[in-house]
Image (tube, rainbow, N blue to C red):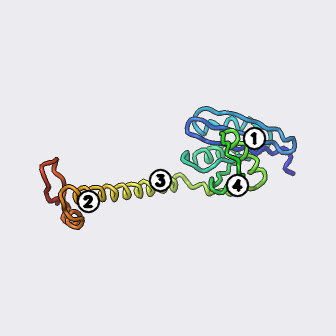
Amino acid sequence: MSEGICFAGLDVHARKTAGAAVQLGSGEVYKAQIAGSPTAAIEWLQSLPGEVRAVYEAGPTGFGLARAARAAGIEMTVCSPGAIPRQPGDHTKTDQRDALKLARLHAAGQLRAVLVPAPELEALRDLVRAREDLRGDLMAARHRISKMLLETVRVTVCEAVVTGCLISRGIGLRSGS
């Protein structure tokens, strides 16, 4: 039934992608190092024999590869990195080994897929994450300023926060408005 299906695993990075594929039935293994953006891997996937089912780990490169592969007619799954089974004692990690492991686990049905969001939803998620990062940075900066004021000028934390005291380039303190 699944004779001729080629399961491919991709270890995706910003400037290169390692690919490995296993063809069911024959057990033949195909490997490739693909230079360029993640979408360059689509050409390699199209060169594989038979029906291709590919997978890669969700990560900082986003979901553009999955969308482009699906548009090219390739069945592409994105899996959760935390749900990949790990062998105890297997500490040797290379891109090729990771790609081959993904291909074999995908063929065995042992990977948990994640939802590929629409581009608009992905952009909204990125915006929310950036806002949360900025809020954290702002709080850290406020804490650093209040601690510095507490140490150098002996202003209490409450006074520094409530009155909005600012440092005026080494001249002294002034009340912010």
Mark 1 sits on what residue?
A: 21
Q: Secondary structure at mark 4?
A: loop
The residue positioned 41% from the left and 58% from the top of the image is 132
Mark 2 sits on what residue?
A: 146
**Which numbered marker is on residue 126?**
3
How far is mark 4 from mark 3, CA to CA?
28 Å
Of marks 4 and 2, the one in the foreground: 2
Of marks 4 and 1, the one in the foreground: 4
Mark 4 sits on what residue?
A: 85
The residue positioned 25% from the left and 55% from the top of the image is 148
Around disc 4, counting alpha carbons within 10 Å, would you say few (fewer than 14), some (14 to 19), or many (20 or more)?
A: few
Q: Secondary structure at mark 2?
A: helix
Q: Which amino acid, by three-letter code, is at mark 1?
A: Ala
Q: CB of mark 4 within 8 Å of CB of mark 3? A: no
Around disc 1, counting alpha carbons within 10 Å, would you say few (fewer than 14), some (14 to 19), or many (20 or more)?
A: many
Q: CB of mark 4 within 8 Å of CB of mark 2? A: no
N-terminal of the pair, mark 3 or mark 1, is 1
Please tell me how many numbered marks the rendered image carries.
Answer: 4
- Work out whether 97 lies above or below 172: above
Residue 39: x and y in percent read 61, 39
N-terminal of the pair, mark 1 or mark 2, is 1
Q: Which amino acid, by three-letter code, is at mark 3?
A: Asp
Q: Which amino acid, by three-letter code, is at mark 2?
A: Ser
Most foreground residue, 90 or 85: 90
